Image (spheres, grey):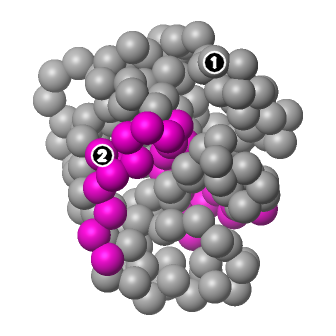
Amino acid sequence: MTWLLLIGRAEGAPPRAGDLAPPFTLRDTHGKEVALESFRGRPVLLHFWATWCPLCREEMPILDEAARGAPERIVVLGINLGERQEKVAAYAEAAHLGFPMLLDGRGKVAARYRVIALPATIVVDDAGRIVRAIEMGALSREGLQEILESLAAGGPKASGP
């Protein structure tokens, strides 16, 4: 099950596998600005989520395991849609999450990536190109392991719609 979400306003074609990932800078729950470009040279998993989304909450321990267990293999960025900093920070602290939680309060980044349902996951390679287009719905431990293994083997093949 996925949760439909219609926020922001996007123009143009959705980013596809092989495209450069649309750049963005968002604040994290501590108020620090975080830019996608700052992770160039390392693969990044963008995970769009919200605290009200049950599937999103189910995935968080799996994502945290990957972030803590393989920081040299992948950077995990949680991108929260539309919720207040205090709520997101409280959730992340209570769940003992160790990866950055970014705040997309007005959904502008989600709109650029054409996220229309939560949860949604996008994998960006070390050169800043999308290697897995939007995958809506829950990310399983096995699915995440497949992503990590393909990155370790030289990068996933471009996939998606």
The residue nearer to you, when weighing 146 against 155, is 155
User: In this rendering, is residue 30 above or below 47?
Assistant: below
Residue for point 37% across, 31% down: 128
Q: Earlier in the sequence, mark 2 or mark 1?
A: 2
Vertically, is 30 above or below 159? below
Give the left or right position of residue 44, taking residue 128 as reference: right
Tell me the number on the disc at residue 143.
none
- Dot 2 surroundings within 10 Å: few (below 14), some, or many (20 or more)? some
Does residue 2 appear anywhere in the picture?
no
Q: Residue furthest right?
A: 142
Q: Position of residue 38 (x, y in %)?
A: 33, 52
Residue at image point 43% right, 16% down: 17
Q: Looking at the picture, which amino acid does disc 1 mark?
A: Gly
Q: Tell me the magenta residue range.
A: 32-61
Q: Which residue is mark 1?
A: 154
Amino acid type at image mark 2: Glu
Q: Is residue 120 magenta?
A: no
Outermost left residue: 11
The quarter holding residue 63 reads bottom right
Which quarter of the figure is the N terminus placed in?
A: top right
Q: Is residue 53 visible?
A: yes
Kindly indicate whether the residue at mark 1 contacts the one at mark 2 (C-beta within 8 angstroms).
no
Query: Residue 37 has which mark?
Result: 2
Q: CA distance from mark 2 to mark 1?
A: 20 Å
> Crowding at label 1, few (<14), some or many (≥20) Cα neighbours within 10 Å?
few
Which residue is painted at 36% across and 67% down in the image? 103
Q: SS for tag 1?
A: loop
- The image quarter in which residue 98 lies: bottom right
Q: To which quarter of the image does residue 27 belong?
A: bottom left
